[in-house]
Amino acid sequence: MRFIKKIDKFLTPIEEYAITIFLLFMTFITFWGVVNRFVLKESLSWSEEMARYLSIWAAFIGASLGVKKGAHIGVEAFVQFLPEKAQRYISIITTVFCIIFCGAIAYIGYGYSLKLISTAQLSPAMRIPIAWAYAAVPVGCALMTLRYVMVLIEEIVNLKNGMAERGECN
């Protein structure tokens, strides 16, 4: 458990700072684009594209932070009617499915990003490699996978501790 807490203590500030920086830049760029368009009567061709890419990166990194904070939605109405032990097992099973799903998306997204790198495709307005924009998917999903693994370990430890407290473990 101590190792997981060290990873969390290292990862959380990085995610929080990255999201903050992305959202601040996105807000500033969007504001500057509006000022240029309506006050200076000039259009920044790259501002909307940059704001979109920053928003995508913030969303995927934020999704990882959402796993840590338990902010993702789930259907709990049915599970609430089950006994506490069954709820814990279902929580473990759903966490395993989340690990599989996020891991698969990270893997597929990584392959797709590599393919985009090999094509040297550029973004329309900023003329940067489009792989930078698409890399948010595998990076964010890899972070979510790591976070779900951490949640799974915590759930298993809590299940074992709960069973040991009640004398159910040998």
Image (cartoon, rainbow, N blue to C red):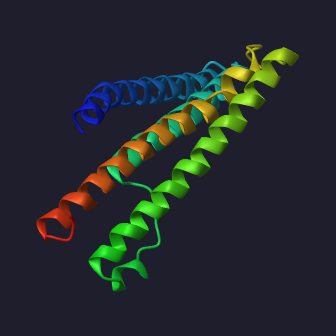
* Total tally of numbered discs in the picture: 0
Residue 73 drawn at (x, y percent): 46, 62
Give the quarter of the image for residue 10.
Answer: top left
Q: Which residue lies furthest to the front in this view?
A: 170
**Left or right relative to 154: residue 124:** right
**Left or right relative to 65: residue 109:** right
In this picture, is 96 found above or below 79?
Answer: above
In the rendered image, the quadrant that contains the C terminus is bottom left
**Residue 124 seen in render:** no
User: Which residue appears at 48% of the width and 62% of the height?
Assistant: 94
In this picture, is 18 found above or below 91?
Answer: above
Residue 140 drawn at (x, y percent): 54, 35
Residue 34 drawn at (x, y percent): 59, 28
In this picture, is 163 found above or below 133?
Answer: below
Q: Which residue lies furthest to the right in this view?
A: 119
Give the quarter of the image for residue 123.
Answer: top right
User: Which residue appears at 27% of the width and 61% of the height?
Assistant: 159
**Left or right relative to 69: residue 98:** right
Give the quarter of the image for residue 41.
Answer: top right
User: Which residue appears at 73% of the width and 22% of the height?
Assistant: 131
**Left or right relative to 6: residue 81:** right
**Residue 94 seen in render:** yes
Residue 7 drawn at (x, y percent): 32, 29
In this picture, is 168 found above or below 19?
Answer: below
Comparing 160 with 103, the one in front is 160
In the rendered image, the quadrant that contains the N terminus is top left
Comparing 158 with 114, the one in front is 158
